[in-house]
Amino acid sequence: MNWIWCLVALFLAGEAAASGFFVARFGGEQGHPTGNSPTAIYYNPAALSLGKGTRLFLDANIVTRAFEYVRDPAAIDNIREAGDTANGTPESALDANSGKATLDNFLVSPFIGVTTDLGGAVPGLQLGFGFFAPFGGASAYEQNESYVGNNAYPGAVDGPQRWWAIEGSIRHIYITAAASYHIPAARFSIGAAFNLVSSEVNTARARNGDGTDHMVSGDDELPVEGRALVDVDSRDYTFGAGVMWQPTDEVFVGVSYQSAPGGDEMMLEGTGVLIQGSAPPSEPKIEMFQSMPDVWQFGVRYTKEDNFEVRLAGNYIGWSALTHQCGADPTVGQNCDDFRKALFVIQRGWNDAFAVRGGASYWTSPAVELLFGAGYDANAVPDDVVEPALYDTDKYTLTGGVRLELLDDALALAMTYTQVIYNDRVIAPRGHAEGATSTTLPESWPAGTRNPDAAGKYSQSIGVLNTSVQYSF
């Protein structure tokens, strides 16, 4: 990634306020498939036809995230009793491989959009250009203070969640051109969008070659815990399309579709650093494969007179496409066709998910709009693949805000706050077969996809402050 994209990425962190790591909440209560703000560039390009003139729209989601994971000691692969020489975790140091991990992150995700009707040169035509990140997440976990400077178990300083995430990010940045055409006689609009997507995965995690969470080996408890750093990216193209129908003056109905980056499977390329025990670090070339979801969005809006509006919107996201993330070094004959020949495999096996959200607006005057909303978003991650790096669960949202129009409606300012309320999750340990030194695996996991057991309790809370400014020319 060149320096320009590195600079951009600093301001394009997001965290799941929707299923999986879908984070498209730009626009706040203005962002939906029947909305008339420039966020329609993504939510539904057909809705661009609701706008007039030329508009510049700047939006920022300011996110605070508190996350806690308490790893169950029964999830540890092998607990070494005194005198045991097998690889594992010493019985006297269980808190080095279990217990509480926390993070408190502050993140910013912008949306920049410009729409224009070209001065009416082509009646019914609207164009839009946008820059935003609908998928993404970032995290940096706090250290385990009890093990700072501990030479016996140096890896433990990174916390019990380190086998899945120490710090990292995953981002999909869209640069979009969109167009909409309105047919007045039919009260119907169609729209399309073309997206250049810059994708990045950058992670650091603890990793052993056999996929276990073993910390030490031998009589003298030599450290065997390794580290893996991955930095890969790609450029892909996607498209979006939508329709908008206005059956009456008060009712608007919209449906849109966004294709997955990379189509059926995307390949990200880059490098990594692998450290295994006392062996010298290696720096393999990495080709990483994953599949992203298609996104369907729908909405209906009813406006009563000049001071009241109600909205219903939702989405359906095809997260079942994300079956795994696999990395291989082709220069040494590795590949992801056979997971046993891969550098690493992270089993995902996610499920499709949906969300539904209701909203309302009340105008206390023509220039002052009060905004309200509530919603439900379903979980995409099954129990057997839940882990701290990419966490999800059922969640609920409550939103309130205000929008002001100034300078004879040329300038609009809006601010909303959304509290995302997550259900806690408690994941039971996978268990050990009799005499085994590692936990059992789900039968559905293909060979070569072993990772440590992430059993334990998960808790999360997210707050999103959305601010936007729009100027019309």
Image: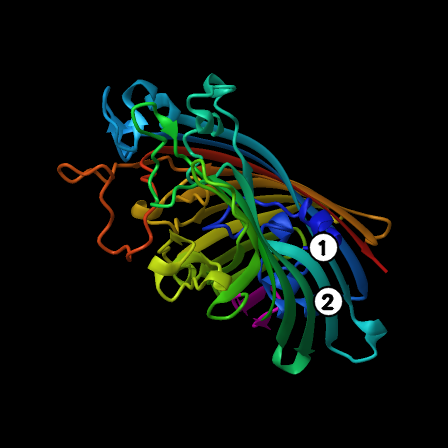
Q: Which is closer to the viewer, label 2 or label 1? A: 1
Q: Please, what secondary structure does the residue beneath circle 2 have? A: strand
Q: Please, what secondary structure does the residue beneath circle 1 have? A: loop
Label number found at residue 290 = none
Q: Is residue 256 magenta?
A: yes
Task: Judge the density around disc 1: few (<14), some (14-19), many (≥20) Cα neighbours within 10 Å.
Answer: few
- Residue at image x 49%, y 34%? 461
Disc 2 to disc 1, C-alpha distance = 27 Å
Q: Quadrant of residue 410?
A: bottom right
Numbered label tally: 2
Residue at the spot of label 2: 128
Q: Please, what is the three-letter code of the amino acid marked with disc 2? A: Gly
The N terminus, quarter of image:
bottom right
Residue 292 in view of the camera: no
Q: What span is colored magenta in the figure?
A: 239-260
Residue 254 in view of the camera: yes
Q: Quadrant of residue 184?
A: bottom right
Give coordinates of residue 425: x percent, y percent: 34, 37
Instruction: Answer with left or right where residue 301 lies relative to residue 342.
Output: right
Work out which residue is located at the far left of the displayed protein and give it.
Answer: 434
Residue at the spot of label 1: 2
Q: Nearer the viewer, residue 177 or 127?
A: 177
- Residue at image x 44%, y 40%? 276
Q: Nearer the viewer, residue 258 or 69?
A: 69
Q: Is residue 25 above or below residue 107?
A: below
- Residue at image x 71%, y 50%? 8
Task: Judge the density around disc 2: few (<14), some (14-19), many (≥20) Cα neighbours within 10 Å.
Answer: many
Q: Is residue 105 magenta?
A: no
